[in-house]
Amino acid sequence: MTIKDIARESGFAIGTVSRALNNAPGVSAETRQKILEVVNRHNYEPNANAKHLKQQANDGIALIVKGTQNMLFADILEQLQSVIEESGYVATVYYIDEEANEVAQARRICAERKPYGILFLGSNLEYFTPELEDLGIPCLLLTNSAATLRIANLSSVSVDDMAASDRMIEYLYKQGHRRIGIIGGKPNLSRPSLARLAGCQSAMLRLGLPFEMEKQYAYARFSLRSGYEAMEYLLDHSPDITTVFAMSDLMALGAIRALQDHGLRVPQDISVAGYDGIALGQYSIPRLTTIRQDMEQLAQRSAKILLHCIEEPGRAVHEVVPFDLIEGESVGKV
C-alpha cells in the first residue's frame, strides 16, 4: 500500500492525502476522516526514511519563466504558485533569458532536482521535440499552444494569438487607421510574436492595408525600455504611421513614453494599442487599449491540468482560453 493507492481508493489527490497524513492545513475534518478510514483499513504506516529520501530527491514542480520583466508572467506566476502550493506541492521558479533554451534548462533541472512536473511560462517551440518525453514527467506550455507538436507528455494552455491580433488590427481599421506600425519580438525566436505577426498580416491583407516589414515592424524585447527604443525606430523609418500595435502592454507603455518625449500626444497624434491586459495599463495616462488575456483562467487551468497529469498520468491536454479587446483611451479615431 502506497500513498498513491490511498489517493486512488479515497478519491482524493495525492497532495491532499499527503497533507492529511502530515496534519497540514488546508484539509477539512471530513476529508481527513475519509482518508484516515482508508489508512486504518489497510494498516498503512508511512515509511519515514523513504519519505526523507523523497523530500531530498524531489523539488515539487518546476516553473521555468522566460524573461524577468514580463508583468503578465509575474501576475500569472503569483496565481500559479498559490494553486500549486494549495495542492500540497512545492513550486520552484527558474528565470532564464528570453532567448535561452528552456528545454535544455528543463533537462538540467531534472538531473539535479527530479521534479514531479515542469511548467514552461513563455517558450520557443523550436526547442520542443519528441525527446522531451525522455524526461519522464508531465510538462505544460503556458501562453503557447503545443497541440501541433504531438508530444505525449506535453500539455498546453494558451490564447489564440493569431485571432487576437487579427481582431486588434480590424479594430484599428474601424477607427480609421490605414498606416499601422507594429512592435514585437523576433518571430524566429518567439512563437507568440510569430502568431501575432501572422494575425496582423492576415488582417492587413484582408483589409487592403499596406505593410512593409522593414519599415513598419520594430523588434523589441518584452520590456518598457525596448518598447521605447522600438517606437523611436518606427518614428525614423515610418513617420507616416497613425497608430502602433505593440505585442505587449509593457512595450506599448514604453512606446507612449517615447512619443511623449518626442512631443507627440497619444492618441491625438499617434494611437497606441497593447496586448496582455496587465493592471498597469489601466492606470496609465491614457488608459491602454489592449487585448486582455484572462490571467486567472490561464493560471488556474494550467495548474490544474498539470497536477491532474501528475496524479493521474494520461494523454496530454490542450486548451485555448478566450481573450477580450479592452477599449481604453490610447486609441483615437482618424
Image: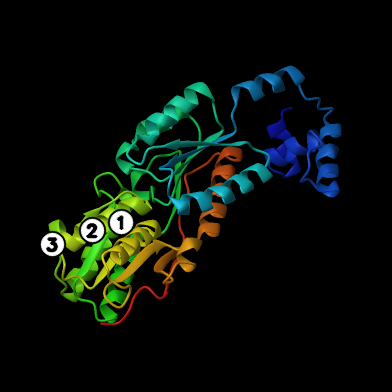
Vertical side of 265 occupied by 215: above or below: above
Vertical side of 53 occupied by 134: above or below: below
Residue type indicated by callout 2:
Glu
Q: The residue tagged with tag 1: helix, strand or loop?
A: helix
Where is residue 200 shown, x and y percent of the image?
25, 64
**Residue shown at the point (82%, 36%) measured from the top left:** 23
Vertical side of 199 occupied by 39: above or below: above
- State the image quarter where residue 17 is shown: top right
The mark that comes first in sequence, 1 or 3, is 3
Q: Viewed as shown, does residue 5 lie left or right of 218?
A: right
Circle 2 is placed at which residue position?
Answer: 232
Circle 3 is placed at which residue position?
Answer: 212
For label 2, count other residues whose C-alpha is less than 10 Å away and answer few (under 14), some (14-19) or many (20+).
some
Q: Foreground residue, 255 or 198?
A: 255
Tell whether label 1 touches label 2 (CB within 8 Å). yes
Where is residue 194 shown, x and y percent of the image?
27, 53
Q: Foreground residue, 292 or 54?
A: 292
Q: Foreground residue, 315 or 325?
A: 325
**Residue shown at the point (70%, 20%) measured from the top left:** 52
Circle 1 is placed at which residue position?
Answer: 228
